[in-house]
Image (cartoon, rainbow, N blue to C red):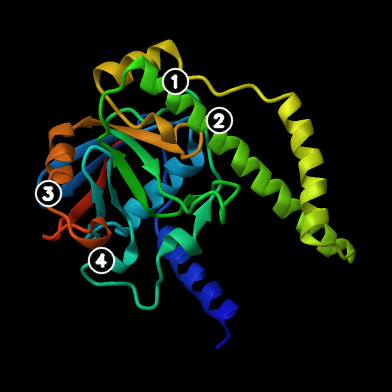
Amino acid sequence: MNLHLKKALVLFSLISLMSCKAPGGNENTTVLLKTTIGDIKIKLYDGTPFHRDNFIRLINSGFYDGISFHRIIKNFMIQAGDPSTRSVPIKNLPDSIKTFTIPAEFNNLYFHKKGALAAARQGNEINPEMRSSGTQFYIVEGVKYTDDELNLAEQQINSNIKQSRFNNLIKETADSMRLSGKSATDAEIQDIASIKMFQYLTNYKNYKISDEQRNVYKTIGGTPRLDGTYTVFGEVVEGLDIVDKIADVQTGPNDKPVDDIKIIKMKIIKN
C-alpha cells in the first residue's frame, strides 16, 4: 500500500469517528473535561464555528476519553489531543497535527489570556496558512506582562504574520507555476513572491493588542505572542486551579510529564 493511500485511509478513519454524532445546537456550549487531577469546565466560542463544531464532534465520538496531556510547559500551556496517547490507541493513526487539519479562524476578540483554549498546529515554515490541528489543543497558563513586554509581543506577532504570509506567497507562486507547466528557479519564484509581498504590505495594518486585552495580560496573565497566529476557540470558566496543578507537574524530555495525566472523560454539559 503506497504512502498516499495509507494517509487517505487514516484520514477517512478519523473523519468516520468524528461523524458518529453531529453537534446539534451549539449556542453557549460548555464542555466538562475530567482529568486524573481534577475537573475543568470550558466554554466554546460561537465566533469560531469550524473549531467549535469539530471539537464537539470529537467529544461526542469519545475521541478524547483516555488521551493524555503529552506536552506541558510551566508558565506557558498544557497540551493534549494526540491520539497515539490514548489508553487504547487507534491502530495506525499517526500524530494528527500533521494528518488532519482545519482552516485557521483568527478573531481579534479572542486572545491568549490565562485559561484560553486554542488549537495546536505545525510551524509557519511548513504550515504558512497556519491551519490548526484537527485534534490537538492546548490551554494557556502563561504569566503576567508589563506594557513594555506587550509592546515586544506586538512586534513578534506582526513579524510572525508577515513571515507566514511571505511563505504562503512563495508556496502559491510555486504551485501556480507548476500547474501552468512553466519552469522557474527558486530565485525567480522568490522575486515574484517578493513583489506580491510588497503589494500586501502597502495595505497591511499592524496587529494591535487592545487596551482591554492589555489589562487582562497585566492582571491575569497569558501568552500574547501567539495572538493572531494560533486559533483561540474557547476559555476555561471553572478549574483554572486544575490547569495550574497540571502545569506544575514534573516533566522530562520533550516536555512530557513524568507521571501520566489522563483525560478520563470529556462531555458536553450545556448547549
Q: Amino acid at mark 3?
A: Val
For badge 4, the amino acid type reads Arg
Q: Helix or strand or loop: what does disc 2 sit on?
A: helix
Residue 107 shows in this picture: no
Residue under the image location 72 percent in, 46 percent down: 169
Looking at the image, is mark 2 or mark 3 earlier in the sequence? 2
First along the sequence among labels 2 and 4: 4
Q: Residues within 10 Å of mark 1 (few under 14, many from 20)?
A: some
- For the residue carrying disc 2, how many other residues have a C-alpha within 10 Å: few (<14), some (14-19), or many (20+)? many
Q: Earlier in the sequence, mark 1 or mark 3?
A: 1
Earlier in the chain: of badge 1 and badge 4, it is 4
**CA–CA distance in space, label 2 to label 3:** 33 Å
- Residue that numbered label 1 is attached to: 151
Which x, y percent locates residue 129? 60, 47
Q: Position of residue 252 (x, y in %)?
A: 18, 59
Q: Is residue 250 visible?
A: yes
Label 1 with label 3: CB-CB less than 8 Å: no
Single out the mark in the foreground, 1 or 3: 1
What residue sits right under mark 2 in the picture?
158
Q: Secondary structure at mark 1?
A: helix
- Rendered image quadrant of residue 246: top left
Q: Please state if 209 lies on the left or on the right of 58 as rendered.
A: right
Q: Nearer the viewer, mark 2 or mark 4?
A: 2
| Residue 237 drawn above or below residue 245 | above
Gap in angstroms between the C-alphas marked 1 and 2: 11 Å
Say which of marks 3 and 4 sits in front: 3
In this rendering, would 123 be left or right of 183? left
> Do the numbered discs 2 and 4 sit on residues whose CB atoms are within 8 Å?
no
The residue at which mark 3 appears reads as 249
**Earlier along the polypeptide chain: callout 3 or callout 4?**
4
Kind of residue indicated by mark 1: Asn
> Label 4 belongs to which residue?
86
